[in-house]
Image: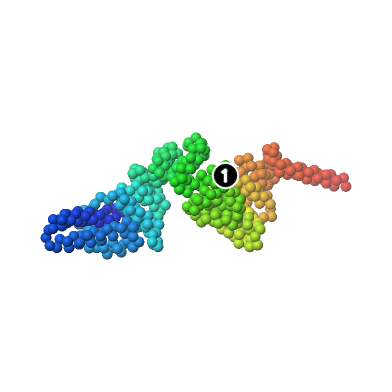
Amino acid sequence: MYTEQTNATLSDIVRKIAGIRQALAECMKLAEEEEEKKGSPGRETDLDQLAAEAKKLEAILRILEGKEDEPVASLVSEEARGYDLQGEEFAELSEPEIEQLRIQGDRAFFGYGGKRPDYAEAMRFYYDAAQCGSGRAYACLGKMYEFGLGAEKNTELAYEYYERGAELGDGISLFAIGKYHEKGLVPGSKGLEDAARCYEKAAEKGNYEATTKLGYMYENGIFYPADPAKALALYQTAADKGNPLGMNYLAASLYKKEDFAKAAELFKKSKELGCARAADNLGVCYEQGQGVQQSLDEAVRCYQFAAEKGNVDGMCNLGYLELKKGNVARDRNAHYTNAIRWLHSAVQADPKRDDAHYCLGVVFESGLGTDRDLRAALREYTAAAKLGHKLATAKCSALVISDSKGLSEEERKEAAEVLAEQYDKGDLQAGYALATTRAGEEREVMMRELAEKGSAEARSYLAAAQQKEEQQQKEEEENKAR
């Protein structure tokens, strides 16, 4: 944590130079008044010297405020060294000066003028700007602690900074606090009710991410009664203000209304502003030829844009499309390899993506771009089935039923547990596969139970078993007759 004892920070220099500049301005005013009275010889030289000093200070401040491209640290050390800054009183910074201090934090955070991002430097600027009353600087500190950027991750401290920013009316801070409430991270919170109030206040402060969030809640009936018209109006407001996420959701609403051309146009604008979700949605438009000319290559580029930004839908869609292209391309293994890469990335980013697990199962079972590996296939099918994927349950059933797959006892046991869970939920196919893992009377009882519940496979099994039994009895009788 930084304190006011931190020595020689640029924010200290800004405050002190501002005070010196003010004092020089007063001296120059007095000198000009004296000159008009034509005072003692040499006064013109004194005035010129004061003007030169004022110009020098103005140059330093322009650099500190980001209006010049020269490196800040070197010029400050050269120009400010001649002043006894420690002996001057701090001057109150104006709002523009505080904002410039916060902007210097942004420049350090994102990197500026070819420099690499410097989180430690950014945090110093943000802290000093926050101490001067910048709500946005508190929000920036909150982000850094929330995500562990330049400091150890500390969500509790992040929340404290967001609270301070919110008290100063900062929209980003209010929106962040809303997300804390929505995720249930605030003790004694009313959850969505408190979250919604924070989003409303943030939207009033001009935070259009919050406006978009409110639109999503109205569209899906989350906390508020479902109101598609209200949702559309909120999306439109955010989009009109250039919010990329607002554009994306507005475009998605138009897409649902089958206004594909307008939807695709908005997805493009949102993607150009860096929205990964919009890039993924635009990829769907290109893949399906909706609102744009169909182009699988453009779809791949859009999905890749989204995937590289960490969008899991983009990763999955890129994996699916690469599998599809691999089925028809000459260099199919290159497409299959790329598909495996992105599907793996998807399940690593979100282990609950049952569709990605299922596709990986298909890849390993079929040996697409890799060696055929039935154990790996069962592992992926099992993961997908645990998440409720119906086709994955069927695949698990098929692998378990077959005795020729070379599965270990442990693997079959794990799959059986998944099948039992799905059977309890009413999946008769999973129940039939589970019954095949049983032996003797236990299998027969379970098959009869399944048949009574309507399982065609169990009925066929019982019919075949009865026919086999009758055939054996007939053969025994014939043997006795001989």
Q: Which residue is at a point 69% across and 41% down the rendered structure image? A: 455
Give coordinates of residue 359: x percent, y percent.
61, 53
458 left or right, relative to 55: right
List x then y, in percent, for residue 427: 64, 42
The image shows residue 470, relative to residue 310, as above or below, that is above
Q: Please, which residue is most extreme toward the left here?
A: 40
State which quadrant residue 20 falls in.
Answer: bottom left
Residue shown at 85% from the left, 46% from the top: 478
- In terms of depth relative to the viewer, which is nearer, 242 or 390? 242
**Residue identified by numbered label 1:** 259
The crowd level at tag 1 (other Cα within 10 Å; few <14, some 14-19, many 20+) is some
- Left or right of 417 on screen, residue 190: left
Total tally of numbered discs in the picture = 1
**Going 30% across and 64% down the picture, which residue do you hit?**
74
Residue 372 x %, y %: 64, 59
In this view, the residue in front, 303 or 43, is 43
- In the displayed orientation, state which residue is furthest to the right: 482
Res. 198 in view: no
Question: Residue 196 versus residue 200: which sits nearer the camera?
Answer: 200
Q: Percent from the top left, x then y, of residue 148? A: 40, 53
